[in-house]
Image: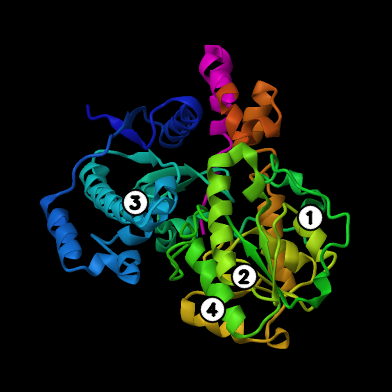
Amino acid sequence: MSKNILFVSRPTKGFYRIFNLSCLTHIERLTKKKFTIQYFKYSYPDLKFLMFYFYKIFSLQVFKKENYLNLKYRNCEIGRYATSRTFRDLTTYRSKFNKTVNLLKYFFLAGSNVDQAYRIADKIQGAYLDHPGYLNGIFFRIFAIKKKIIYSNNYPRSLFFVNFNKKSDLRLNKIENTLRLFLRKNHKIKSSEGKKKILELIKNPKKNPCMSVTRIKKFGHKKYNLQNYDYIVYCHSFMDGALWYGNDGFLNLEEWLEFTLHYLKINNARVIIKPHPNFWNEKIWSYAKNDKTIFNQIVKKFQNENFLVINEPYSNSDFLKRIKKKTILISHHGTPLLEGSVSGFKTICSKSTLWAPKYKISNQWGSKAEYSKLLKKNWKNLRYANKKDLNIITYLLTKTKYAYGESKHYETTLLKHFNMKRIDIQDQKNTHKIFNKINNAPKNSFSKLVNKISHNIEEVTL
């Protein structure tokens, strides 16, 4: 009798012990079949890819960033995933040599993943994939095409699955279309609850998942006159997953920020440049230190009397209360745009963000050319967020049972089971505590946790 296999992208240890076993329990209940977990280590690519790889190198095509970003192999966007992984690697930022080596390294690994995914696709029935915005996005794409049941856990979703065995919409076989928030037929939206939650997060940013261990200073003085500025540019971590929600033409967030400041400088715009408060977060110091260094290098190039550079970790609420209502808010993606939209500001962001592009929440662009046009527009020619769309996305982000902090989010279940606080799981210096609890949990207790989480896995459908 042939075995039913659940492919997993990480060994069954630590957090991944919970994810792997919860998905195993779920897929066995879903299919009414017994499964075996199997972890496949990286393998070498086929000869076909090696020829493709060396051709791209020796023809110098791979050294042009647009060519690299748009590389495709066997119906998969390997350039996008290799780029995303390259700029998540701390060593990339240490020298131009390291950057080149990493681009070639992750190009090779991306192609290896493609060939490996096709080789094992017919041997498996399901898969759990961590961090599918990086190289594991290749497995997601190919296993979806091959009609497997795929599990993952990524913000803004909790632990979720897509059953490509069913007649799934083909749009879901791209990871961005699965991750993005959109309204399904069975969703019932209570119009103002999500907006109220966003307003709460503005007042108390510590409730935001990425801010729970962040040091924030009080804006208790008149150091800055914020009324004189036309724009706020919100800077993300430069190691953030800029390509998780799609390819908008930028290699990374460093390139996006330089492009933005260049255009605003040409237009003599008055701009507040606000870095993410996590740039000062010692809890994630290796990343924060790198972010702060890159940030300082970029803003140094654009120093002029029209640009106000904020070099302290202030909350967004301090700025939204003090700027004029005609200030335009710019960010590549993320919650600052939702906070600004809820507060009545006009915003600009990429279509590669956490909600589906059909929702008119921001003035969005999908290419550098579209972005340039938006940056040239004045305030009156930009639109406000559509109120109905804003209600939908803020509700889906904050108030559904699978939303972060809500009852069916896997982290809520985990913390409740081990009697821990959310800050314990967010502080990267203390992750050993939760690992110890997971690894040393009594068998019966751990089985109850796995069973509970397996009943709280969201199915994503259109």
Q: Which kind of residue does numbered mark 2 sit on?
A: Tyr
Marks 3 and 2, the one that precedes in the sequence: 3
Find the magenta span and give its range: 434-462
Marks 3 and 4, the one that precedes in the sequence: 3
Q: In the image shown, does 161 or 268 lie closer to the viewer?
A: 268
Residue 23 place in picture, x, y as percent: 46, 34
Q: Residue at x 69, y 39 (%)?
A: 213
The residue at which mark 3 appears reads as 98
Mark-to-mark CA distance, 1 and 3: 39 Å
Q: Which kind of residue does numbered mark 1 sit on?
A: Ile
The residue at which mark 4 appears reads as 371
Marks 1 and 2, the one that precedes in the sequence: 1
The residue at which mark 1 appears reads as 202
Residue 100 place in picture, x, y as percent: 31, 56
Residue 259, label in figure: none
Q: Is residue 182 left or right of residue 85?
A: right
Q: Residue at x 35, y 46 (%)?
A: 148
For discs 2 and 4, the disc positioned in front in the rendered view: 4
Mark-to-mark CA distance, 2 and 4: 18 Å
